[in-house]
Amino acid sequence: MQRVTVTLDDDLMAELDKLMEERGYGNRSEAIRDMTRAGLARKRVEALPDTPCVAALVYTFDHHAREASNKVTAAHHDHHDLTVSSLHIHLDHDQCMEVSILKGNVNEVRHFADHLVSDRKVKNGEVVIIPTETTTS
């Protein structure tokens, strides 16, 4: 294991300490190590668009909005090769949330997720992409 000295300004250190408390990190090294891993994983995903991956796409929409449910369903059917499974949740009388598990290459999954989330009937959306192939750089 390597020892590294890092200098952070007071505001950033305060944010780090708050994050540590919220997430229950035992020390700053654990928190910084975790964030470094996350940043490197994000970099790998961005740099390797043809890498196989799995992803969780989470989004909300108003199912009463004209054609919203049909458009979301059609998008999944049009990309049935990427969609492994979906969970539909009724948040209240009008709002629904869906969690879709996707599998394919990073580029295809990101394109599908961006396309679905950019629809004006989808209110909120996030995708988490996890590479399934280990590579060395």
Image (cartoon, rainbow, N blue to C red):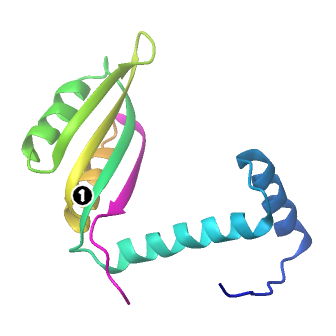
Determine which quarter of the picture holds residue 93.
Answer: top left
Q: Choose between 107 and 85: the one closer to the eye.
A: 85
Q: Choose between 120 and 58: the one closer to the eye.
A: 58
Seen as rendered, the residue at the extreme top is 93
Q: Is residue 2 above or below residue 37?
A: below
Residue at x 83%, y 58% (from the top left corner): 17
Tell me residue 38's x, y (percent). Answer: 53, 66
Q: Is residue 51 above or below residue 110?
A: below
Residue at x 54%, y 70% (from the top left corner): 37
Say which amino acid is labelled 1: Val
**Could you tell me which secondary element the residue under label 1 belongs to?**
helix
Q: Is residue 47 left or right of residue 124?
A: left
Quadrant location of the C terminus in the rendered image? bottom left
Tell me residue 111's x, y (percent). Answer: 24, 60
Tell me residue 75's x, y (percent). Answer: 16, 41
Which residue is tagged 1?
Answer: 109
